[in-house]
Structures are given as C-alpha cells and as structure tokens.
Image (spheres, rainbow, N blue to C red):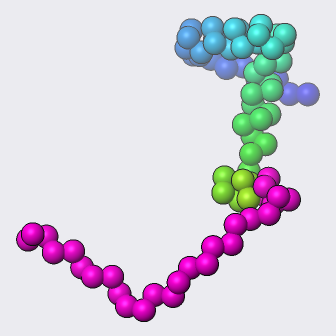
Amino acid sequence: MASLTIRNLDDHIKERLRIEAAHNGHSMEEEARLILRRALSKTADSQGLGTRIRARFADIGGVELELPERTEAPRAPDLNE
C-alpha cells in the first residue's frame, strides 16, 4: 500500500479530523482514508439527484398529470398598469 504525507494542513482541519475520527471510533489515519475513499469513489458521470430520487420511489409508482393542451400563447404582461 502507498503512503501519503499532507503538509501545511490547517490546525482547524486537523482538529475536525481528530474529533470525527474519535466520534466514529477510528484513528485519524483511518478516518482520512475513509474520507478520501468516499470522495474519490464519486464519478463525474454519477446519477443526478432527480434521477436518484426517481429510482428510489419507482416501486410505489409515479403521478400522471393530465395537462391540457395549450391553445394560444400566454398574454404578455402589461407593465404600464
């Protein structure tokens, strides 16, 4: 396995990492590995939020709306009123 050294890390970031690691019962090193793994596992072509929501609720069915056909263009607003 490879090693990585991160220099010039803000004290605030290191402290947040320490707290998060302790909260999750991990060492700081393990927590950093998990964070990197999660961040880099997301691909640029991953599904968008709308697609994921639709997939999650696909089993319960969707809503079919009956939309009337437009017969004419909407009237432009009169801004002088």
Instruction: Say left or right for 63 vs 59.
Output: left
Instruction: Say left or right for 57 vs 16.
Output: right
In which quarter of the view is residue 73 placed? Answer: bottom left
* Horizontal and vertical percent position of residue 15: 63, 8
State the quadrant of the C terminus. bottom left
Instruction: Say left or right for 75 vs 45.
Output: left
Residue at the image point whose x is 72% and y is 53% from the top: 53
Magenta span: helix, strand or loop, mainly? loop
Query: Does residue 4 sit above or below 78 in this rendering?
Result: above
In which quarter of the view is residue 44 placed? Answer: bottom right
Residue at the image point whose x is 24% and y is 79% from the top: 76
Query: Does residue 59 sit above or below 12 in this rendering?
Result: below
Magenta residues (range): 55-81
Q: Tell me if residue 46 can be seen.
A: no
Q: Is residue 70 magenta?
A: yes
Q: Of 77 and 41, which appears nearest the observer?
A: 77
* Horizontal and vertical percent position of residue 35: 75, 27
Instruction: Say left or right for 68 vs 50.
Output: left
In which quarter of the view is residue 65 placed? Answer: bottom right
Q: Of 77 and 25, which appears nearest the observer?
A: 77
Q: Tell me if residue 3 can be seen.
A: yes
**Residue lying furthest right:** 1
